[in-house]
């Protein structure tokens, strides 16, 4: 409905559901657009940044009040002017929070090759969050067998996958999460060696020392703030930190300072940020590998499914309170 100030948690009432009665169910002739029926829509933390108006253009455009929110989604093609997409194909890419979308920017629209796995996976494990976990872990972390790996927001869309990749690599894997239910999932569903509830253990340094008496080789950073500081104090020589996200900072406006950065020098740590959008060239390689892992039962994935567009605002807002258990998505239609 409106832009948000940078220092406020989004509320459901910042969004509204609007009914319209005219739907154009054809692609205009001569256009290369694709008309989709939206099936699944994604809720992602980066969408918070799009709710605030930026003076300088960001890496993703700000939302425009009065127009549908956009995010990744899975849809079925109803009409197409594009040679790569046929009627009846399933696709994933940027779409609108609406029942039907006319997608004019098809550069990052991807045809779904495997329809024998849940289609919703294409906004999770086989979509943007999955590719984030894959590129972040294998490309940025340079992992080696036997290394000590820590992941924050570990039960989420990205984290649960990073942990399982690290396990497959033969690493020792620990995750933090914000509830006992999530900690239980990390240990008993995703096979993490250890996990802790950071809300119950405010002394993060102590929790990390207990889990990593010999220190951390790889930190997959999803939250920032106090967790980053505590991790810096527990890194090993030549450690790597992949800065994927810092969700604890997204609603603060003025970001918190980090105190332990000197550890980067003394321990020769490499700390590197990355954007998944730079890794779409690896998408098909990633997709084939992970589909195989899913079919072989080597990787499992948990989704938190909100039913209907009417529940979309609460699902999105819930990310910032940790209400989601696994990948948060919205079902608009199943067929
Ligand atoms: P999640 O599914 O993990 O959902 C967000 C989770 O963050 C919540 O469930 C909650 O888990 C945790 N959280 C929320 N607020 C706070 C807080 N104040 N302090 C600590 N934890 C908090 O999200 P994703 O897996 O989709 O995303 C994980 C991270 O990866 C985000 O930072 C996101 O921005 C980033 N990202 C970066 C990309 C890139 O290209 N660099 C691409 C995609 C994602 P809990 O209950 O455990 O606190």
Image: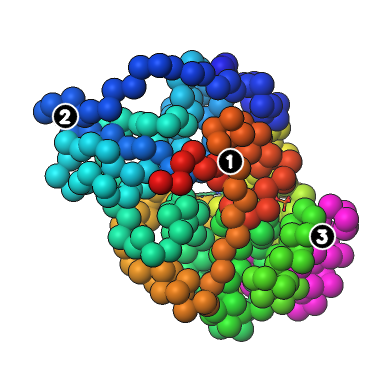
Q: Quick check: 136 above or below 72?
A: below
In the picture, the quarter occupied by the N terminus is top right
Query: Would you name the residue on which mark 2 appears?
Result: 31
Q: Residue at x 43, y 63 (%)?
A: 117
Query: Would you name the residue on which mark 1 appears?
Result: 307
Q: Quick check: 212 above or below 70?
A: below
Q: Is residue 172 visible?
A: yes
Q: Are marks 2 and 3 in contact (CB under 8 Å)?
A: no
Q: Is residue 204 magenta?
A: yes
Query: Residue 331: horizontal and vertical position, in percent?
Result: 52, 43
User: Which of the pair 66/295 is nearer the observer?
Assistant: 295
Q: Are marks 1 and 3 in contact (CB under 8 Å)?
A: no
Q: Residue at x 38, y 51 (%)?
A: 278
The Cα atoms of the two marked residues, 2 and 3, are separated by 51 Å
Q: Quick check: 5 above or below 147?
A: above
Query: Would you name the residue on which mark 3 appears?
Result: 180
Q: Label 1: few (<14), some or many (≥20) within 10 Å?
A: some
Disc 3 residue: CB within 8 Å of ligand 1: no
Query: Residue 104: horizontal and vertical position, in percent?
Result: 27, 31
Query: Residue 40: horizontal and vertical position, in percent?
Result: 47, 44
User: Which of the pair 16/133 is nearer the observer?
Assistant: 16
Q: Residue at x 74, y 59 (%)?
A: 182
**Nearer the N terminus, badge 2 or badge 3?**
2
Q: Is residue 203 magenta?
A: yes
* Quarter holding residue 198: bottom right
**Nearer the N terminus, badge 1 or badge 3?**
3
* Quarter holding residue 79: top left
Circle number at residue 185: none
**Nearer the N terminus, badge 2 or badge 1?**
2
Range drawn in magenta: 195-220
**Closer mark to the observer between disc 2 and disc 1:** 1
């Amino acid at each position: 409905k409106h832009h948000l100030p940078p220092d406020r948690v989004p509320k459901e009432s910042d969004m509204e559901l609007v009914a319209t009665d005219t739907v154009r169910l054809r692609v205009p002739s001569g256009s290369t657009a694709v008309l989709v029926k939206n099936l699944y829509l994604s809720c992602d933390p980066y969408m918070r940044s799009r709710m605030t108006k930026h003076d300088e253009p960001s890496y993703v455009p700000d939302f425009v009040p009065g127009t549908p929110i956009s995010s990744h989604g899975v849809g079925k093609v109803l009409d197409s002017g594009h040679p790569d997409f046929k009627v009846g194909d399933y696709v994933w890419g940027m779409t609108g929070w609406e029942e039907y979308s006319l997608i004019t920017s098809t550069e990052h629209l991807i045809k779904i090759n495997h329809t024998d796995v849940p289609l919703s996976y294409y906004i999770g494990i086989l979509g943007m969050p999955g590719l984030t976990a894959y590129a972040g872990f294998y490309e940025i972390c340079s992992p080696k067998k036997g290394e000590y790996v820590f992941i924050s927001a570990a039960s989420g869309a990205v984290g649960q996958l990073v942990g399982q990749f690290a396990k497959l690599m033969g690493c020792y894997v620990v995750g933090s999460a914000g509830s006992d239910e999530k900690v239980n999932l990390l240990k008993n569903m995703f096979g993490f060696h250890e996990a802790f509830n950071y809300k119950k253990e405010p002394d993060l340094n102590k929790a990390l020392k207990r889990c990593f008496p010999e220190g951390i080789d790889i930190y997959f950073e999803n939250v920032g703030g106090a967790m980053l500081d505590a991790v810096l104090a527990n890194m090993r020589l030549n450690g790597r930190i992949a800065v994927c996200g810092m969700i604890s900072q997204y609603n603060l406006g003025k970001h918190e300072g980090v105190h332990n950065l000197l550890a980067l020098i003394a321990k020769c740590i490499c700390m590197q940020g990355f954007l998944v959008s730079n890794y779409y060239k690896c998408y098909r390689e990633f997709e084939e590998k992970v589909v195989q892992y899913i079919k072989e039962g080597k990787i499992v994935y948990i989704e938190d499914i909100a039913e209907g567009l009417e529940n979309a605002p609460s699902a999105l807002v819930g990310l910032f309170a940790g209400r989601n258990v696994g990948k948060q998505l919205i079902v608009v239609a199943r067929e």
